[in-house]
Image (spheres, rainbow, N blue to C red):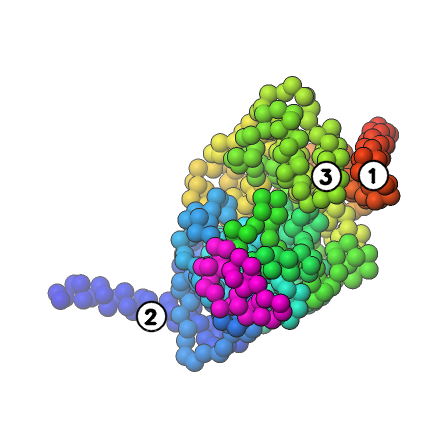
Amino acid sequence: MSALPFLLLSLLLVSTSCAAQESEVPTKYGRISGYITDYNGAGVRTFLGVPFAKPPTGELRFMPPEEPEPWDGVREATGYGSACPQESMYLQGFAEPFATVNVPWSEDCLYLNVYAPVRGSSTEDPLAVMVYIHGGGWQAGTGSGNNGTQLATENNVIVVSLNYRLGVFGFLGTGDQHAPGNVGLLDQTQAIRWVRDNIANFGGDVNRITIFGLSAGGMAVSLHLLSPLNSGLFRRAITQSGSPFTPGFLGTKESALADARRLAQSLGCDRTSTEDVVSCLKSKTAQDVLTTSSAVQTPTHISFLPIVDGTFLPTSPEEIFAEGSVEARDYILGVTSMEGGIVLYDDLNEKIVSEETFQEHLEYVMASYNTNLVQITHAAKFEYLRNLTASPRDMQLDFMTMYGDWLFVAPTTRMAREFANTGNPTYLYNFDHITSYLDHPWIGGAAHAEENYYLWPSDNSDMMTDQEKLLGRRMRTMWTNFAKTGNPNSQDLPVTWPQYDQHGRQYLTLSTNMGPGSVQAHLRSKQVFFWNYMVSALARVCCACTGAVSSATAGMSASVWTAVALLVGWTLATRVGMVL
């Protein structure tokens, strides 16, 4: 080897050694070594693939997470841990902003990542901590999909991202100790507990931990707000397009057991006792379990979801709020202005070309209303379909509007109302900017998850306009101000974001032209009333009517007349300003 290459190699080794030494941190389970990088002149210490639980393999499959085994020496934390098992199409490029880096999946997947600003001295005040829970419909995603470098360095906070078990591995349940269910949520709780126990060693403030998440990650955050298992683990929460009241995404022990039995039958594990069923399922390969779990799902039923298990969730969200057993925390939640854009490129949406197909697709997506489905979907069509002879494009737009209100807007505003009524500081937002480089301006609003482009860097960040980059900086300031103080406002922002309460019901519209006029009230109140009150009442009353009459024909007639009566009442209510 010549002198020059040898000298360069020596310098590289010295540099790497120094960086590793500077980024060594002790944890409860052993020392870890990350690396230091520079971002716009600021240093960030990065630790990737840090285990927060034992590998959930073998006998630990389908079981709650256990603390990781301690290790001797220094564990290298410079590469992402494996993603949790999921269909390969997600890891090959799940559509942004759920985009993931190219990592393989493995059952050994319970790892987290820490992004901590380089500090001048160990005596500096500890930093607020933000723990991100990714979305993906409870079926996909990974904590490696969101790089926390920018958020950490620009706003001087510590960012943590995490993996959790998905689909059948995270949510198969038999309703007993053999497979209790909700272990994906328990993984998240274990990760948050790891942060509480260790983050001080990274310069973090254990009294200022904020959890935040998008879509299914947002729903997870909302469920953590209601779970007694999280008492004292975090101080604040942010949910982006997620709510515990989202229809069709919170099951029961009975529904989970039915899903487990259906899977077991398909895998040749149909046994009498749940113990034998689970033992057989544990003997199957992860790939066989994953592939078969996807095959047993039906178009109108998503299996392997969170459930009311009596432990993580003692009772339903409605009952938890009614009992007043919600811990005091600060809260931000919100939606985008066209949440239904989530079906923009779905074949389902493209097939809506007439009143008949509009009705058919309403019944398809709302199958969770298994009682009096037709009456409820007729009411939805009456509310949303503006013109029976409209063009297919306009009908598709009406369908997207309906879908977003039903699945995201109404559940989120209900959560805002319920949480604000507990007396906790609550802030509601509506993100309303169509990103310039996206190809869906015709939908007239920001699609589901679009705000995440402004919180996390992506491959397309350089394509943003100057105004969009400013919006991103302002949003990151709001999110991190909230994590630091419980208040998203600051003098550098062009508007003051008021708290949401039962009287004013104010919210902030996030856009490139934010100003005093961005503070509005009663987010989509007419549509929210329709879903949260009218449809709920229609389902209850129709159910009672159908059960009270002797013939199917009479039951249908009673249901129709009930629907008509409620629709008339709804019309009168909107005219006299009774909507919420």
Type of amino acid under label 3:
Leu
Query: Eyeballing the image, is 180 above or below 338?
Result: below
Q: For the residues carrying marks 3 and 1, which lies nearer the camera in this image? A: 1
State the residue at coordinates (83%, 39%).
Answer: 551
Chain-order first, disc 3 or disc 1: 3
First of labels 2, 3 by sequence position: 2
The residue lying toward the viewer, choosing from 169 and 199, is: 169
Task: Using a 10 Å C-alpha cutoff, classify the residue at mark 3 as few (fewer than 14 neighbours), some (14 to 19) or many (20 or more).
Answer: some
User: Is residue 41 shown to the viewer in this render?
Assistant: no
Q: Secondary structure at mark 2?
A: helix
Judging depth in this view, the residue of 330 and 44 nearest the camera is 330
Look at mark 3 in the image and give the residue it sits on.
373
Position of 278 with respect to 86 (left or right) is right
Coordinates of residue 491 in the picture (x, y in percent): 64, 46
Q: Amino acid at mark 2?
A: Ser
Q: Which residue is mark 1?
A: 551
Q: Residue at x 77, y 59 (%)?
A: 320
- Quadrant where the N terminus sits is bottom left
Residue 280 lies in the magenta stretch: yes
Classify mark 1: residues with Cα within 10 Å, few (<14), some (14-19) or many (20+).
Answer: few
Q: Give me the C-alpha separation between circle 3 and circle 1.
A: 18 Å
Viewer-closest of 78 and 489: 78
Pointer 2 residue: 17
- Kind of residue sitting beneath label 1: Ser
Residue 538 colored magenta? no
Q: Position of residue 81 (x, y in %)?
A: 44, 63
Q: Which residues are magenta?
A: 264-292
